[in-house]
Amino acid sequence: MKTRYTVALAMFAGFGLGAVAVQGLHAQAKPPVYSVAEIDIADQAAYSTYVPKAQAAIKAAGGKVLAAGGKITTIDGEPPKSRVVIQQWDSLEKFQAYRNSAAFKDLLPIREKVAKFRTFVVEGVPQ
């Protein structure tokens, strides 16, 4: 009978420790960051050839394109006069690693010729 109590107590203790560990992991998880870019396109034809290359580099670096050039509906203030692109990244460090990567730097001369970019990053809210 003592063995049953010992096993039951050990199971409850294991469950409790597991729950505490999971809570600790959730507390340490960083929220994602979102890159928002307003893009003034100077050369539409060249921009159209740039986009697939840029999206492939973003995906390879771990980014995810959430919105790109869709219809913009103004709620307050003036709407952007350009294209808007929103990307999701696991962390600011991953976004910065992409921006420092050879893939991004190889695309930079094309990017600078085809459009003017205004980019910023916003930290997401912990879920």
Image (cartoon, grey):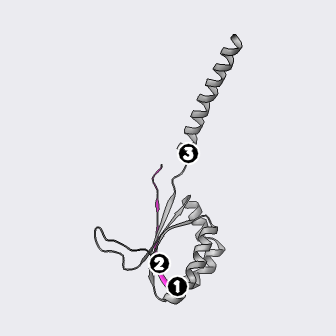
Q: Which of marks 2 and 1 is nearer the N terminus?
A: 1
Q: Which of pointers 2 and 1 indicates the residue nearer the eye?
A: 1
Q: Is mark 3 on a helix, strand or loop?
A: helix
Mark number for residue 117? 2
Disc 3: which residue: 28
Disc 1: which residue: 47
Q: Position of residue 28 (x, y in %)?
A: 55, 45
Q: Position of residue 11 (x, y in %)?
A: 65, 24
Q: Which of marks 3 and 2 is nearer the N terminus?
A: 3
Q: What element carries label 2?
A: strand
Front residue (pair 121, 18) = 18
Instruction: Answer few, some or many: residues within 10 Å of disc 3's Cα (few below 14, many 20 plus, some between 14 and 19).
Output: few
Q: Does the magenta stretch include residue 61?
A: no
Q: Which amino acid does label 2 sit on?
A: Phe
Q: Which of pointers 3 and 1 indicates the residue nearer the eye?
A: 1
**Is residue 108 placed above or below 13 in the rendered structure?**
below
Q: Where is residue 104 in the image (x, y as percent from the top left)?
A: 61, 75
Outermost residue, top side: 1
Q: Where is residue 8 in the image (x, y as percent from the top left)?
A: 65, 20
Magenta span: 113-127
**Is residue 122 placed above or below 44 in the rendered structure?**
above
Mark number for residue 97? none
Marks 3/1: CA–CA distance: 40 Å
Q: Which residue is drawn at 52% across and 89% down?
A: 45
Q: What residue type is labelled 3?
A: Gln
